[in-house]
Structure formats: C-alpha cells, structure tokens
C-alpha cells in the first residue's frame, strides 16, 4: 500500500516543481533588470580627474536662457598651464571652451548634443601632470 501512495506523492511533487518553474519565468526577467536600473539610479555622478587636476563644475547644461557657463580648472601646482581638448565639441559645433589660467567659458554651439572636454594640466617643462573632464550638454 505504501508504494501507490509514494508514487502519488512523487507525481504530485514533480507536478509542483514543474508548476513552480512555469510560474517563475517572469521572475528572472524582473530581477535581472532591477539591479541594472538600481545601479543607474544609485551610482553617483563622478567627475573625471587625475593627479589633483579638477574642473568645477564638472558638468554644464547649456540652455536658451543660459547659453554660456563659467568653469574653474585647478591643478596641483600654482601657475598651472591647461590645454583644453574639446575637438569633438568644436567639430560637432556643440560647444566651444575658451579661456586661460584657471577660468574658462563654455559657450553653446548651434548643434544640440553632448560632449566631453578634457583639461590637461602640464608642468613647467610641458609634460602632462593629469587631466580633468568637463561634461557638456547643449540643449539650445
């Protein structure tokens, strides 16, 4: 008598496992998309900088009401010389970066979009010390 009962329980167990598998098909999709969404929301916006070189603010959004912004670049030594590399910004006419010393002006171009300008700090001999990134978004 025990054998039919065990066969019945075995069949019931298999059916329950299969039913559980069928019901969980949507679950992995939601759990795999959730961490990606959380990481995008949770991860802080970081400014790219290296060896004490920075630019503040490190992100600017240019709009019709504010088509220009001023940023300040800093390096580890006084008398810092910066080279601004914004070829993508300029080539696509998204924005231009002009200035000298530690103060620079970012001006909107005629094309909407985003680009990154790199500020390269050089020592007295012209050797690169480090870089900082400025993220530019043009909404004009």
Image: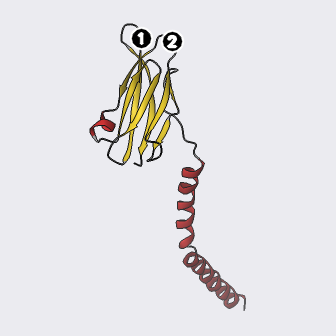
In terms of depth relative to the viewer, which is nearer, 37 or 29? 37
| Left or right of 116 in this view: 52 | right
In terms of depth relative to the viewer, which is nearer, 38 or 101? 101
Pick the quarter of the image with the N terminus.
bottom right
Look at the picture and state if 14 lies above or below 55.
below
In terms of depth relative to the viewer, which is nearer, 42 or 5? 42
Name the disc covering residue 123, or none. Answer: 1
Q: Residue furthest front?
A: 65
x%, y% of residue 40?
A: 54, 51
Q: Is residue 91 visible?
A: yes
Look at the picture and state if 56 lies above or below 31.
above
**Residue density around tag 2, few if under 14, some if 14–19, many if 20 or more, within 10 Å:** some
Q: Residue furthest right?
A: 1
* Tag 1 near tag 2, CB within 8 Å: yes
Q: Residue at x 47, y 10 (%)?
A: 79
Q: Is residue 49 visible?
A: no
**Residue density around tag 1, few if under 14, some if 14–19, many if 20 or more, within 10 Å:** some
x%, y% of residue 47?
A: 51, 34
The residue beneath circle 2 is: 77
Look at the picture and state if 56 lies above or below 67.
above
- Residue 135 lies in quadrant: top left
Q: Residue at x 52, y 15 (%)?
A: 76
Q: Residue at x 56, y 75 (%)?
A: 21
In terms of depth relative to the viewer, which is nearer, 34 or 122? 122
Name the disc covering residue 106, or none. Answer: none
């Amino acid at each position: 008598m025990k054998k039919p009962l065990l066969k019945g329980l075995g069949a019931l167990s298999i059916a329950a496992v299969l039913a559980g598998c069928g019901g969980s098909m949507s679950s992995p999709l939601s759990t795999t998309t959730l961490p990606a969404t959380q990481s995008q929301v949770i991860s802080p916006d970081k400014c790219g900088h290296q060896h004490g070189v920075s630019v503040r603010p490190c992100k600017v959004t240019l709009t019709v009401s504010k088509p220009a912004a001023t940023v300040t670049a800093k390096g580890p030594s006084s008398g810092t010389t910066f080279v601004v590399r914004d070829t993508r910004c300029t080539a696509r006419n998204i924005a231009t970066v002009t200035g000298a010393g530690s103060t620079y002006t970012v001006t909107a171009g005629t094309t909407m979009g985003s680009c990154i300008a790199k500020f390269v700090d050089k020592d007295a001999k012209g050797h690169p010390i480090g870089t900082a990134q400025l993220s530019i978004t043009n909404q004009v």
